[in-house]
Image: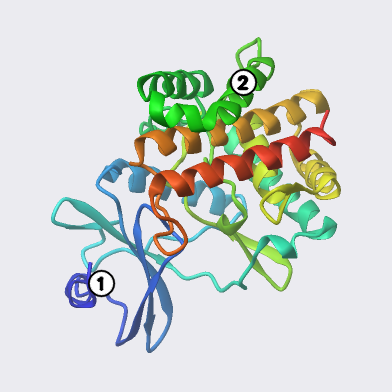
Amino acid sequence: MNEDQIKIILNQYSLGQINKISPISCGLINQTFLIETDSDSYIAQLMNKMYPPVVTEEYDKIQEYLAAHNFNIPKLVKTRTGQKYCFLKEQVFRIFNYVAHDSVDYSMINNSLANQLGQAWGQLQRLLSQYLEKPTFKLKNFHETRSIIEKLKAVNSANLEKSSAVENEYAMIVRDIENLYFSEPLANTVIHGDPKIFNLLIKNNQIVSVVDWDGIIWASPLLELGDALRDWCQKDMIRFDFQVYNSAVEGYLSQYDLAVRRSAIAQATKLITLELAARFLTDYFEENYFSWDKIRYLSAAEHNLQRTRDCLAYYQDMCQYVK
């Protein structure tokens, strides 16, 4: 999507004089732009074809629900005719109000910020647990770990040449993950779906909003907490920060009671970490899902193998602390 196309579709909105359009490169699936006008700033997004209009419809309902409970997330800007979105060919195009925030990276996550992250996500999950309208869209195999592992086993068996180079990585994943499955079904609620640090907007060391709601799903908040901890606690890709982990867990549980033992939180964190390693290793074989760095690596397979090894090194460091 180029700037001329954006300007044409922006005519369907009353935004004022457009001063600048800047692409935002942090997303891997949707095309996102910062729109600066003479009066305000906005985020414009062209959705990937995999996302039907119902994803935006459901987001709008959740945004209104959360706003009524004083938890603010970006609000959709309506078109001139009052629509929540419009189309560019078959893809949904939508605009949000811009939420001012600071740049963030993992080196900034200290114990204090980790506690705030945990509190914010716990507060959000408490509110979402009371939202009873189930989302209708679901990403395939979302945290369906057994299915992800079965796919890894299949692609490993089907490609003997590649599999010989990853015997150790493959063995660790399929061996260790057997001890991390939950024996009983986990309780489900509405969850956000992607709690990585870059989806929490921070301004002056305060969490001011949560973005990237395309993965809204009816699933386990325990697994999502594990995913959050996997992301927030990493240092230099392969080191695990146990103090950050404890601070984040304390913050989360102060706002939302998962009604599980601490050992279950540790189990979920390790499970999701190995699940991610399995996804990277699967794409080492298939080379068709994750984007890859064409400057540093010769192929998607090479990049995904490095991701797998980093993820497993991180998992091993995590296991020294999280019991």
Image quadrant where residue 72 sits: bottom right
Residues at discs 1 and 2 in contact (Cβ within 8 Å): no
- Give the x, y percent position of residue 21: 33, 79
- Front of the two marks 1 and 2: 2
Q: Which of 19 and 25 is in front in this view?
A: 25
Q: Residues within 10 Å of mark 1 (few under 14, many from 20)?
A: some
Residue 318 lies left or right of residue 80; in this view the side is: right
Q: Residues within 10 Å of mark 2 (few under 14, many from 20)?
A: few
Give the label on residue 207, or none: none
Q: Nearer the viewer, residue 123 or 197?
A: 197
Residue 126 lies left or right of residue 289; in this view the side is: right
Residue at (58, 58) in percent of width and height: 198
Give, as a three-letter code, the residue at label 2: Ala
Image quadrant in which the N terminus is located = bottom left
Q: Nearer the viewer, residue 284 or 23?
A: 284
- Give the x, y percent position of residue 222: 66, 30
Give, as a three-letter code, the residue at label 1: Tyr
Residue 130 lies left or right of residue 27; in this view the side is: right
- Give the x, y percent position of residue 193: 52, 40
Image quadrant in which the C terminus is located = top right
Give the label on residue 187, or none: 2
Measure the C-alpha gap from mark 1 to mark 2. 42 Å
Residue at (42, 22) in percent of width and height: 151
Relative to 34, say whether 111 is above or below.
above
Residue at (56, 74) in percent of width and height: 100
